[in-house]
Image (cartoon, grey):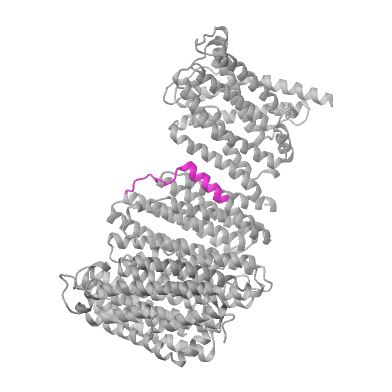
Amino acid sequence: MTQELLTDTINGLAAIVLLTSFFLVANTRMHQLVRTFTLQSLALGLFAFFVAYYTGAEHIYLVAVLTIIIKAIIIPRFLDYTIEKIQVKKEVEPLVGIPLSLLICTGLAFIGYYIAEPVIANGNIITKNCLAISVAVVLIGFYLMASRRKAMSEVVALLVIENGLFLAAISITYGMPLIVELGIFFDVFVTVLIMGVFVFKINRTFETLDTRFMRRLRD
Amino acid sequence: MMIELILLLPLIAAAISYFVKQQHVAEAVSMLSGVLQFILALLIAVDVMQNGAIQYGLWYADELSVFMLVIITFLGSMAVAYSFSYIGHDREEHEISGLQLRRYYLLLQLFLFTMLVVVLTNNLGIMWIAIEGTTLTSAFLVGFYEKDTSLEAAWKYLIICSVGISMALFGVVLTYASSVDVAGFPSDSLNWTDLRSVAALLDPTFLRIAFIFILIGYGTKVGFVPMHTWLPDAHSQAPSPISAMLSGVLLNCALYGILRFYIIMQLSVPGFAPDLLLIFGVISLVMAAAFIILAKDFKRLLAYSSIEHMGIIALGFGIGGFLGIFAGLLHMLNHALTKCLMFFGAGNILQKYNTRSIAEVRGLAYIMPITAALFLLGALAITGSPPFSIFLSEVMVLQAGLGAGSYLVVAIYLFAILVIFAAFMYHVSKMLFGKPTEGVVRGEIHHVSLIPMAILLVSILVIGLFLPQQLMDFITKVAALFPGGSR
Amino acid sequence: MVQDVLLNSLFAALQAVTMFALSPLIIGIIRKVKAWFQSRKGSSIWQPYYDLAKLLRKDSTMSKDASWISRATPYIAIASVGVVALMVPFFTTYSLGFVGDLIVVVYLLALFRFFMVLAGMDAGSTFGGMGSSREMMVSSIVEPTMLLAIFTMALITGTTTLSSISYSLAVTGPDLVRPALFLALAAFFISLLAENARVPVDNPATHLELTMIHEGMLLEYSGKQLALMEWASWTKFLLFSAILANVFFPWGIATDLSALGMAVGVIAIIAKVLVIALAVALIESGTSKMRLFRLPNLLTESFTLALLAVMSFYIL
């Protein structure tokens, strides 16, 4: 593989990660949401793989494999299982209409570019441009979190934020120390499991996953 | 060696208390583990004070770590001691099952474990993982009663803190990125000691952005306004000993995370971190005052008071200088002790009256005189009345502020604590006096619980009245770790 | 210089004529493929020619309420499509690029639409008005999308003339391929479906009053005028396909005057247009028409894609 083609591939995969987060905003069904997330994680895993190939850093290969196994296989399966099990109504029901959401997210992507700009100007590594994308993905994750009211969508939103951070970690530092990387994987995994447990409990107690019904606690 | 041991203790205790299916075993093991952890913490503290920081492998313990270690383990064992009566009472009332009771001790020990890792690790990445771990372990404790309100609180806690923490991860990533270009720096090191030694060479652009994210991220767990929304819910819904742990220890742990970065920031970009802390401190103080006036639920009242005190600590570090930093550290200790006392008292009241509403608690002084006395003294202490220890640290913050010439901040600070004092006393006096609520039988709810409360009261009195020389020296040494914090 | 202009004009005219000649065939092929997917035999692929011939032999009737707009619209339609056809590269990059760039192209097409919308309301029939208002709703999002998508390509190649974009891409080869290209391509493809009243935006095969957009505006036309309008619409579809093929994937297009190059160019564009037609037929067979109020979702998605395409040009 030539150098140029390699960087193009890396940038292209980063673009796919951004694109899929837009699809997540536009998705209206739970399973669709999970599938798009799977796609995003897959792109992220491949991104890590090519960065590993590019830098020759062996531990990033491990990270790539773990990303694909945990984020693109295990977690989506678990989410699908949860959705099926609790018979949640499959529509996502965003608070803000999809066209407006998409425009807002485009705005967020631009903001991401401006936040990342000083860092981009400062850095001297090839994947530094991906930082802008990762900030955008994180911001879109926040937007998803704020605009969705189903407990399940909030879990997916959190995962999107994690994916964005992960992209940032790989693109500006070529990965963190291995032990930290492993710990973060473990953390994400456990977080999702615990949230799954709570989703079950919430569903049992409230007979809905709509967090708008959880408004008892206020001043 | 001692570090591994102190980390192993809660894990062993967790396993035993869960797998041995007897309530008394679970309680005894937890208590034993708590006390042993405290003793070990003291031993490590003495070692560090005499021989300097311990550093090997992933672990690192300097004066700041052991200061936190002592707070965590002391309050941890207090919380376990209080749990006997509180959780035991729930079990007697059949509010929880035997399995739940064992699970409670399991989670409590795991919670302690994650907090110990936070203060004992050298690696900032592992610290992040451990702080996220505290959220995960305590989320189940917050939602312990599995009622609708407690599930709501737990879900909010889980989501808001996870999101906040993920911001902090971004900060950690950027901090790491700032070190990538430093020549001769081990490229895979996120060790705090390594970063501190090259702090002046780190990329300041990265660091500035990193600190903002760290402050917002860990600040969510500290409970800085406006990221505090999870805090009153979680504190009011969790079992009272857990509320005490959250408020007294967990918030401090998150703050510890910020302080580690604060030190690096001060070495690299002096003045940036304190200014941000000042801003968050003032906002938290003012907003907490407003919420305290309006409080209707006495556990939420205490939660908002925690936000207030985190604000005061932030002010201390924001003002800086020896006095400011010393005051901040002392206040961390004082607040932890006093707030634990208050939450234990609140737990007794809650179980007696079966309500959290301030309006429905009347005549406490008649119904539970000892608890009432302790609660009143605690309330006086938490609002900064002499001769209790919080008075000392609050005055020090004041002095530091005046010394640094931040008069506006000092004015807001004074105004806020006066308002809070008045509002707090208003609420508490209503609860204490008046015609006792009907249908509540006179008599203490449980007597064992009064012992940890009394210990806590004595300790804040001792600090407030005498401020022992050993403690002075200890905290002075901790403050000396901070740039500009030596005497 | 003069020679160049003459040469370009010659080829432009040749390409425009080819496009007008081929457009009914492409529509016929799409219909045939759809018929196969629906397990029907379907009409011959030459059927659109027969239809045109039949309609051109017949007289038109006009509503007595119709004004000159209704009468003029068919000629404006065929004229604007004709001018655009002169400027869009088909099998060779020699075309009248110097007359106007992509902005002229897009707004000539907008002129076509504008008059069609007016004509829809002109006769005062209810369906015409509904069709017109829906068309405006769709086009208000599609038009900027289309502009942005082609604009991305203009950014990549550094020129706003369609034939030059296609020329420089064809000459430079895959080095110019960037993520932006694929984003813009996706956005443009959705615009293509929306602009040409294909499923899932509109259904060209139905006259159901609740759903139709494009057909609603043509309801009042008959005979020769209908023939002109239909032919203009079909050619517009071919034009969009040509822009899609030659702006985003121009490889194979003739960039010089050699006979071999021209032959390759003709084969390449026919293959590319057939692929696009097949894709459209597949989409029409595989998806159902969207509810009108869900349309803005799809269209803003494509707009977002186009916006991202422009942005990713700067970021990546």
Left or right: B262 in relation to B429: right
Residue C115 visible in the shown view: yes
**Residue sitting at x 50%, y 10%:** C64
Q: Position of residue C200 (x, y in %)?
A: 48, 31
**For the image shown, how many numbered marks are present on the structure?**
0
Q: Nearer the viewer, residue B4 or A199?
A: A199
Q: Quadrant of residue A122?
A: bottom right
Q: Which residue appears at 47% of the width and 50% of the height?
A: A37
Check the image and report above or below for C295 versus A102.
Answer: above
- Judge by depth and name the residue closer to the eye, C51 or B151: B151
Q: Position of residue B161 (x, y in %)?
A: 43, 64
The span picked out in magenta is A87-109
| C256 relative to C112 in the view: left or right | right
Residue C266 lies left or right of residue C139; in this view the side is right
Asked if residue B452 lies in the magenta stretch, the reply is no
> Is A101 within the magenta?
yes
Query: Would residue A2 be seen by someone viewing this image from the given angle?
Result: no
- Where's residue C221, x and y in %? 52, 14
Above or below residue B432? Residue A26 is above
Q: Nearer the viewer, residue C122 or A180?
A: C122
Location of residue C84 in the rendering, given as x and y in whole percent from the top left corner: 66, 25
B243 with respect to B445 (left or right)? right
Of the 4 image quadrants, the one containing the C terminus of chain A is: bottom left
Please identify the quarter of the rendering in which residue C77 is found: top right
